[in-house]
Image (cartoon, grey):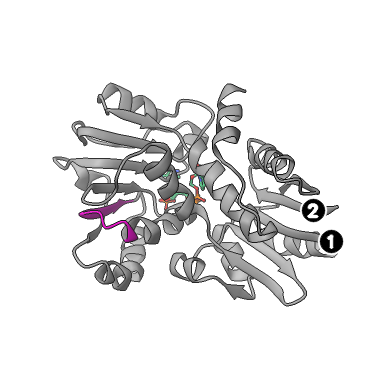
């Protein structure tokens, strides 16, 4: 049977094995999909071991998306733009890296939540692998502005300078980096938490009145209410979404890369919410 896994640290919380098992059943594909905990300084050696054991590919989660980028022999265009990889495919030609996070997030917002991104003011919190992965696809939807706020400002600044040519190609998007303190007095239509603060249950230092009327607060974390979602509720954001839809959509995109079949996401999302 073909073997796949999700690699992370931590990884026990990952729902990817359940999702891929559901996709495999739905599309009659024979495969197994597990969880692999890699040591923080041992991503590349873990990947080599999995290749030796006959794995066909892996999904990559926190904090290894940059390591996965480094470890790929070939990169898709969207992985190159993102500078981060969440899907590796192993073949005789080597390791191919791709990034399906952005496609997953944008599809969840546009199709599942049924909200446009075009013409919206977007705030992206965080400048790690997940944020890098979603920036390019968000810019392609032509929002009015994308501001990136990060605890370590330099990382957000570097991210903006790498993405500027892409933003300019999408004509009028205003792309800026800032600190959390700079957010005072600003308002956004869509605020996306792409930090890992929810994993450690930490609140972000966000000011009041950040949400415009009819705003969406989107947390990439899933499975429980995070401090960011709690803040959004207190601030009366119109719609609060967790990252389950993104997770299922990015997984479907990875499944398509590996198996050449696109699974239906709606029934899998429904089953996971019910569970
Ligand atoms: P990384 O480790 O690459 O980046 C972490 C980011 O979070 C950095 O910007 C870091 O800031 C910031 N951060 C961490 N803790 C805090 C804190 N206490 N206060 C403020 N900022 C903080 O992780 P990823 O980008 O890979 O993942 C981020 C999150 O997104 C994770 O929770 C992950 O589970 C989720 N995710 C969900 C997906 C889905 O499909 N739903 C897909 C991908 C990711 P600094 O630079 O200052 O360290």
Q: Which residue is mark 2?
A: 3
Q: Are marks 2 and 1 in contact (CB under 8 Å)?
A: yes
Residue 147: % across, % down: 26, 53
Between 52 and 18, the one lying in front of the other is: 18
The quarter holding residue 160 reads bottom left
Asked if the magenta segment contains residue 145, the reply would be yes
Q: Is residue 166 above or below residue 144?
A: below
The residue at the point 22 percent across, 42 percent down is: 188
The answer to whether residue 4 is above or below residue 110 is below
Which of these two is toward me, 178 or 23? 23
Can you give x and y, in whole percent of width and height, for residue 126 in the image? 39, 49
Residue at the spot x=27%, y=48% of the render? Answer: 122
Residue 62 shows in the view: no
Residue that numbered label 1 is attached to: 54
| 37 lies left or right of 157 | right
Q: Is residue 178 above or below residue 72?
A: above
The image position of residue 113, as x and y in percent, is 38, 36
Q: Does mark 2 have its CB less than 8 Å from ligand 1? A: no
Q: Is residue 100 visible?
A: yes
Q: Which residues are magenta?
A: 140-149
Q: Earlier in the sequence, mark 2 or mark 1?
A: 2
The residue depicted at 51 percent of the width and 33 percent of the height is 222
> Which secondary structure lies at badge 1?
loop
> For the residues marked 2 and 1, what is the alpha-carbon distance in whole angstroms?
7 Å
Which labelled disc corresponds to residue 92? Answer: none
């Amino acid at each position: 049977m073909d073997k796949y896994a999700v690699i992370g640290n931590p990884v026990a919380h990952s729902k990817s094995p359940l999702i891929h098992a559901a996709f495999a059943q739905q599309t009659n594909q024979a495969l197994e999909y597990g969880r692999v905990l890699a040591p923080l300084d041992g991503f590349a050696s873990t990947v080599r071991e999995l290749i030796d054991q006959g794995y066909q590919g892996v999904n990559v989660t926190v904090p290894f998306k940059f390591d996965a980028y480094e470890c790929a022999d070939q990169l898709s265009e969207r992985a190159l733009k993102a500078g981060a990889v969440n899907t590796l495919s192993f073949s005789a030609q080597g390791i191919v890296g791709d990034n399906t996070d952005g496609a997953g997030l944008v599809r969840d917002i546009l199709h599942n939540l049924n909200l446009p991104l075009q013409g919206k003011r977007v705030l992206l919190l965080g400048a790690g692998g997940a944020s890098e992965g979603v920036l390019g696809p968000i810019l392609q939807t032509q929002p009015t502005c994308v501001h990136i706020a990060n605890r370590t400002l330099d990382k957000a600044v570097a991210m903006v300078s790498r993405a500027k040519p892409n933003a300019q190609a999408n004509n009028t998007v205003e792309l800026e980096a800032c600190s959390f303190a700079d957010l005072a007095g600003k308002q956004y239509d869509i605020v996306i938490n792409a930090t890992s603060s929810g994993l450690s249950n930490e609140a972000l230092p966000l000011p009041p009145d950040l949400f415009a009327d009819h705003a969406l607060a989107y947390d990439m974390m899933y499975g429980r209410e995070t401090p960011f979602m709690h803040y959004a509720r207190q601030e009366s954001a119109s719609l609060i979404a967790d990252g389950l839809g993104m997770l299922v959509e990015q997984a479907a995109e990875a499944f398509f890369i590996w198996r050449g079949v696109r699974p239906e996401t709606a029934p899998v999302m429904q089953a996971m919410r019910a569970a």
